[in-house]
Amino acid sequence: MMKSIIRTENAPSAIGTYSQAVKIKNTVYLSGQIPLVPESMEVISDDFSQQAHQVFKNLAAVCEAAGGTLNDMVKVNIFLMDLSQFSTVNEIMAEYFSQPYPARAAVQVARLPKDVAIEIDGILELPNVD
């Protein structure tokens, strides 16, 4: 099994012992992204909508570095500090994805890194390039 590490300056660098993403054949496993601004490594805002937008932008940057787009994602896991933000996440996600949407889970958690309100990870399936 040959794995490739995906890294981009357009998304926050890892703040622990992990890679932004790992690619095996055409499958890319994306680590969780939180609403850090890549240039400053600071949380964008306390506002939930701004945090969610930043997370999707970070995910998009990692997808692009891997050779794909958000629409190549086949599974998305959304971790929320407050599940009452579920409808807001749906509205914002619809701005970044087109149908057919990926499979998805959304769960409320007790705490996230840097006390942010949202974290998202997922799996990307790259198109076959022959």
Image (cartoon, rainbow, N blue to C red):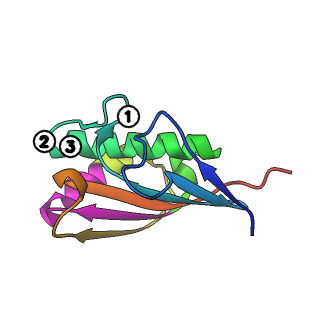
Residue 52, position as x, y percentages in the image:
27, 46
Based on the displayed image, in which of its 4 quarters is residue 125 positioned?
A: bottom right
Q: Is residue 116 visible?
A: no
Instruction: Say if the magenta span includes residue 80.
Output: yes
Q: Which of the pair 8/85 is nearer the observer?
A: 8
Identity, as a three-letter code, of the amino acid under mark 1: Pro
State the SS at label 3.
helix
The amino acid marked with disc number 3 is Ser
Which label sits on residue 49?
3
Please report the residue visible at 14 percent of the width from the left and 41 percent of the height from the top: 47
The residue to which callout 2 is attached is 46
Q: Amino acid at mark 2?
A: Asp
* Mark 3 crowd level (few <14, some 14–19, many ≥20, 10 Å Cα): some
Which element is circle 2 on?
Answer: loop
Tell which circle, 3 or 1, labels the residue nearer the N-terminal end. Answer: 1
Q: Which residue is mark 1?
A: 38
In the rendered image, the residue lying farthest to the top is 39
Assign the N terminus to one quadrant of the image. bottom right
Report crowding for label 1: few under 14, some 14 to 19, many 20 or more residues within 10 A (C-alpha): some
Depicted 59 relative to depicted 22: above or below: above
Badge 1 element: loop
Q: Where is residue 120, by image quadrant? A: bottom left
For the record, the magenta segment spans 75-91
Residues under labels 3 and 1: Cα distance?
A: 18 Å
Looking at the picture, how far across and down is residue 68, in whole percent? 61, 46
**Residue 45 location (% of width, % of height):** 17, 37
Residue 9: in magenta span: no
Give residue 66's position: percent from left, percent from top.
62, 46
Which callout, 3 or 1, points to the residue nearer the camera? 1
Q: On the picture, is 41 further left or further right than 124? A: left
Is the C-beta separation of discs 2 and 3 under 8 Å?
no
